[in-house]
Image (tube, rainbow, N blue to C red):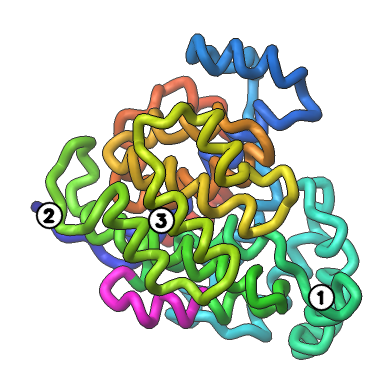
């Protein structure tokens, strides 16, 4: 089995995250009635659209990936500056309300992230899913050291998400991506790796996630049968309708953990849960692609997905 570098693993996760984000956005509730979406998902038919644009999930993940390339880790001041500049350069990517408030401030005063992030949501900080949705490339980068993956995930989250559960969501996704990347040496679906999968992976993720609702949700996901229908799993675990990390991460990781050999199947399963589909699919896609890359994905999906910036390819 061929070994891959940290950079290659992170690039795989980024590509899968961006694909999941763009794919999931097709099913987001504001575009079509839920029943119509479910019927098309059930038939495995994608909408007829010329381009699948990605959202803030990918825009912010690109900043995390750039931070890894530049610093081999997270420098929070520089990451804050990148987040702010990215929003100002292209604000129509579907950022959440809190980010429209926070990121322009960080663009001017990136060193003030600790003070500014905690002021969101009546001084509690954000417990949303924004830190989790962008972190899979970081987890893949630090696959060799799960403790470092968790710590760097915390650093990346703190810039925008001061609430402990917003941070916990990022830690859980990063650890899951790290574990998936350990088995992703060949990028061929079905390749045998050394990382855990299914309930075993989820239990290990839960064991490294800070206590609270996110960890409780990942443990519930570990106990949920892989034969559970995705819609039912989403009902039990949450699929991002409340926009909280605890309502998003468990279902996305349940879907990823049980489809580690097929990015395509993982994304269809996650989409069937509806909810905040671009974010759940971004999380699932980033984790699974850390193992598989884009192997097995339909060519038309890759043709339709909005391309990543040219510098990503140049840095590969």
> In the figure, residue 203 lies in which quadrant?
bottom left
Q: Position of residue 225 (x, y in %)?
A: 36, 38
On the rendered structure, is 293 left or right of 104?
left
Q: CA distance from mark 2 to mark 3?
A: 16 Å
Local crowd size for mark 1, using a 10 Å CA cut-off: few (<14), some (14–19), many (≥20): many
Q: Position of residue 88 (x, y in %)?
A: 83, 61
Local crowd size for mark 3, using a 10 Å CA cut-off: few (<14), some (14–19), many (≥20): many
Judge by depth and name the residue closer to the eye, 164 or 100.
164
Q: Secondary structure at mark 2?
A: loop
Mark 2 and mark 3 lie on one chain; the one further toward the N terminus is 2
Judge by depth and name the residue closer to the eye, 66 or 56.
56
Give the number of the disc on residue 2.
2
Residue found 52% across the figure and 39% down from its top: 19
Residue 127 drawn in magenta: no
Judge by depth and name the residue closer to the eye, 143 or 86.
143
Instruction: Tell me the residue that label 1 is attached to.
Output: 107
Residue found 81% across the figure and 63% down from its top: 99
Q: Position of residue 237 (x, y in %)?
A: 56, 46
Residue range (magenta):
143-153
Instruction: Tell me the residue that label 3 is attached to.
Output: 11
On the rendered structure, is 280 left or right of 72?
right
Give the number of the disc on residue 77.
none
Q: Where 40 falls versus 177 (above or below)?
A: above
Q: CA distance from mark 3 to mark 1?
A: 26 Å
Q: Which quarter of the image is occupied by the C terminus?
A: bottom left
Residue found 40% across the figure and 43% down from its top: 224
Residue 15 shows in this picture: no
């Amino acid at each position: 089995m061929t070994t891959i570098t940290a950079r290659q693993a992170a690039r795989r996760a980024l590509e899968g995250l961006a694909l999941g984000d763009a794919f999931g956005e097709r099913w987001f509730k504001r575009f079509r009635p839920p029943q119509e979406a479910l019927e098309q998902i059930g038939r495995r038919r994608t909408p007829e659209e010329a381009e699948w644009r990605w959202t803030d999930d990918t825009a912010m993940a690109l900043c995390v990936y750039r931070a890894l390339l530049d610093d081999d880790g997270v420098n929070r001041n520089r990451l804050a500056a990148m987040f702010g500049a990215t929003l100002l350069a292209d604000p129509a990517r579907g950022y959440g309300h809190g980010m429209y408030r926070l990121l322009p401030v960080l663009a001017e005063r990136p060193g003030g992230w600790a003070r500014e992030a905690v002021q969101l949501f009546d001084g509690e900080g954000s417990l949303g899913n924004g830190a989790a949705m962008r972190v899979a490339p970081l987890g893949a980068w630090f696959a060799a050291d799960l403790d470092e993956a968790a710590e760097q995930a915390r650093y990346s989250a703190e810039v925008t998400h001061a609430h402990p559960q917003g941070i916990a969501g990022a830690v859980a996704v990063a650890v899951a991506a790290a574990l998936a990347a350990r088995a992703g040496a060949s990028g061929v679906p079905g390749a045998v790796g050394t990382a855990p999968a299914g309930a075993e992976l989820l239990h290990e993720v839960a064991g490294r996630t800070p206590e609270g609702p996110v960890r409780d949700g990942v443990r519930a996901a570990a106990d949920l049968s892989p034969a559970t229908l995705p819609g039912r799993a989403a009902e039990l675990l949450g699929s991002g309708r409340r926009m909280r990390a605890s309502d998003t991460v468990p279902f996305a990781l349940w879907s990823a953990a049980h489809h580690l050999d097929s990015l395509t199947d993982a994304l269809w399963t996650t989409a069937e849960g509806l909810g905040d589909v671009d974010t759940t699919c971004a999380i699932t896609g980033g984790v699974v692609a850390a193992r598989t890359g884009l192997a097995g994905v339909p060519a038309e999906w890759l043709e339709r997905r909005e391309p990543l910036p040219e510098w990503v390819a140049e840095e590969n």
